[in-house]
Amino acid sequence: MFLVVRQGRLAEYSFWTLLLLFSFLVLLAVTVGRGARGIDQALVSRYTTYSILGVVGLYAMLAKLRSESKSRLTAILFGTLLIVVALTMPVAYAGGVKVGLSTEATGEKAAAVLATYESQPDSQLTSLNHNPQLVKKRAPILQKLDYNVFSEFGP
């Protein structure tokens, strides 16, 4: 941002600047809003989409600056960003796979409970909704419409 402002090209980079600002403000609001529930909730991964927008904005600004000027500072900043992204990708990917497998297992368990809701005790139905009576009320609707776990997939 400093380089863009210093070169007097803020209008030319307005989209990327606003993307960075949007990303920062959303993440700030989420962190403050969820911060009251503890640091674990403030940094929940479901909000990474907004931080990725910031990285994309920063990347685009630095790439454009790098292509238009051969400044040593721009090269260092752009290179640093590329190195940080390259080093964090394997960690983020591995974490995503782990979370994905956990989500899959949780979903399969929930599907099994829902498919057999009529014979499940209320304690098991609370894994689907905190109100087991609501599950018992709505599951027949899904079953009648062949939705969700009640539909047939394949021959």
Image: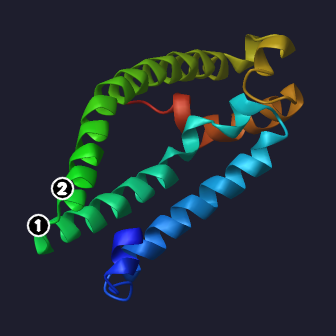
Location of residue 10 in the rendering, given as x and y in whole percent from the top left corner: 38, 84
Q: Quadrant of residue 145?
A: top right
Location of residue 148 in the rendering, given as x and y in whole percent from the top left corner: 54, 35
Q: What residue does disc 1 label?
A: 70
Give me the C-alpha separation between circle 2 and circle 1.
Answer: 7 Å
Residue type (three-letter) at the residue carrying disc 2:
Ala
Location of residue 143 in the rendering, given as x and y in whole percent from the top left corner: 62, 34
**Dot 2 surroundings within 10 Å: few (below 14), some, or many (20 or more)?**
some
* Residue 118, placed above or below residue 46: above
Residue 55 shows in this picture: yes
Residue 155 shows in this picture: no
Is residue 80 rendered to the left or right of residue 101?
left
Residue at the front extreme, as displayed: 72
| Residue depicted at x 53% and y 68% | 21
Q: Quadrant of residue 86?
A: top left
* Residue 19, placed above or below residue 49: below
Judged from the image, the secondary structure of the residue bearing numbered disc 1 is: loop
Q: Quadrant of the C terminus?
A: top left
| Residue depicted at x 56% and y 41% | 46
Q: Nearer the viewer, residue 34 or 80?
A: 80
Q: Nearer the viewer, residue 55 or 113?
A: 55
Q: What residue does disc 2 label?
A: 75
Q: Are marks 2 and 1 in contact (CB under 8 Å)?
A: yes
| Residue depicted at x 17% and y 58% | 72
Q: Quadrant of the N terminus?
A: bottom left
Is residue 107 rendered to the left or right of residue 63?
right
Location of residue 15 in the rendering, given as x and y in whole percent from the top left corner: 38, 79
Judged from the image, the secondary structure of the residue bearing numbered disc 2 is: helix
| Residue depicted at x 57% and y 19% | 106
Residue type (three-letter) at the residue carrying disc 1:
Lys
Q: Quadrant of residue 16?
A: bottom left
